[in-house]
Image (cartoon, grey):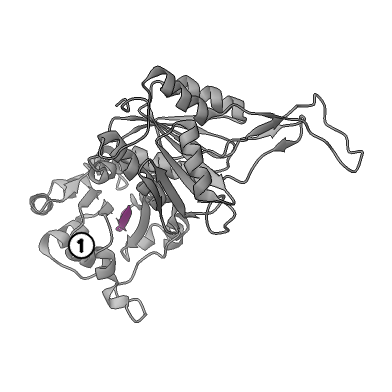
Amino acid sequence: MLIALGVTGGIGAYKAVEVARGLQKHGHEVVAVMTHSATRFVGPVTFEAITRRPVITDQFAEGMNADIEHIAIASTIDLLLIAPATANIIGKLANGIADDFLSTLYTATRAPVLIAPAMNSQMFAHAAVRKNLDTLVARGARFVEPGEGYLACGWIGKGRLAEPDEIIAAAEEILRPESPLRGQRVLVTAGPTYEDFDPVRFIGNRSSGKMGFALAAEAAHRGAEVSLIVGPTELEPPSVREVVRVRTASEMHQAVMSRASDMHVVIMAAAVADYMPERAPQKVPKGADTLTLVLHKTPDILGDLGHRRLASGRGPALIGFAAETQDVVARAIEKRAKKHVDLIVANDVARTDAGFDVDTNAVTIVTADGAESLPLQSKTNVAGEILNRVERLLSGSRSAESASPVRG
């Protein structure tokens, strides 16, 4: 979701940097809106580097459509979060004053508004400020109460900006939709596996883990308790209940199978190696022009999950991925039937703009009802579309091939 992060002129502005970073870790996109005073505490370039978006600081920036940019943003954001919010901006919002970009954005948007006040404790207790806060509450704005302690002015009292984790949690509470996934235990795998053929070298693939991380972040956003099992990747994982790091297909197999019986949904987005080489005890020296490796089939995690569910008559909803370079949909249809799973996400990894190690994907979702193609879009959006179908499985609104009703 898209969040406009309003930053005003207070010493707590430095905490807004961590708020932006935390919101991104939860899978949200952030656009920073800074007042002129805020730029005296934190430079706009800091927020631009974190959000990877231009920072809005001027109501009258040059450009053909600059004067209506606040309207464009107002109609697209899912939340307006102001942290820190000074007494000045609170007064403007309460009294309809729109003399800068942030206050104008407030009057123009119909998105939920979350305000994290920060000011001197005497100011926070002043009758005018309390009246303004009450006015905003009556209009539907929500607040994150300031903390107590030492203030920048040297006083001790209530008025310090709440900690970033508290602000992020409040934003998540507003944005989290009512979802069949809420309270459900979801296991997601992500990234590649590496199979060593000597103590130095390995066989791997180009999977970055971005698709699996997007799925884990979106499932957590919908209220699921997410366990993320991830192969080697340099990406920072999203904030979920459990992160388990593995290296090989065998390690991922063990991690998944030991947890799957307690899950409501298992999503196998990892690019797991199909074969592993016999591992030499020492580094294989460079010698002949060719080198022959003996490969053995790795455990079939998705297949084992499907057959275990078929044999026991119960188990989690199963979602697999089919990374192919030809006959993509046909092979996905075959894989879904062979492995007794509910849904297969097929993607053409031969494309340069989709699949491995890029931020976008174009997939075909294969269920018992047929195949549905999704256009090229961000992996965050693809994750949302996939989980929409998972929610339908959980609610029983669409048919799915399984040995028994999905446990949930």
Identify the residue shown where x is 34% and y is 67%: 57
Identify the residue shown where x is 35% and y is 44%: 369
Quarter of the figure with residue 94: bottom left
Q: From the viewer's perspective, is 19 left or right of 149?
A: right
Q: Is residue 337 visible?
A: yes
Q: State yes or no: residue 299 in magenta.
A: no
Predominant SS of the magenta segment: strand
Give the camera-side residue of 60 and 242: 242
Q: Which residues are magenta?
A: 1-10
Identify the residue shown where x is 40% and y is 46%: 383
x%, y% of residue 375? Answer: 42, 59
Q: Callout 1, which amino acid?
A: Thr
Q: From the viewer's perspective, is 20 left or right of 181?
A: right
x%, y% of residue 385? Answer: 36, 48
Q: From the viewer's perspective, is 144 left or right of 281?
A: left
**Number of numbered callouts drawn:** 1
* Image quarter hosting the C terminus: top left
x%, y% of residue 155? Answer: 26, 42
Q: State yes or no: residue 9 in magenta.
A: yes
Looking at this view, name the residue that lies furthest to the right.
Answer: 288
Give the camera-side residue of 288 and 237: 288
Residue identified by numbered label 1:
109
Q: Is residue 268 visible?
A: no
Quarter of the figure with residue 390: top left
Give the camera-side residue of 266 and 93: 266
x%, y% of residue 14? Answer: 38, 50
On screen, 181 above or below 352?
A: above
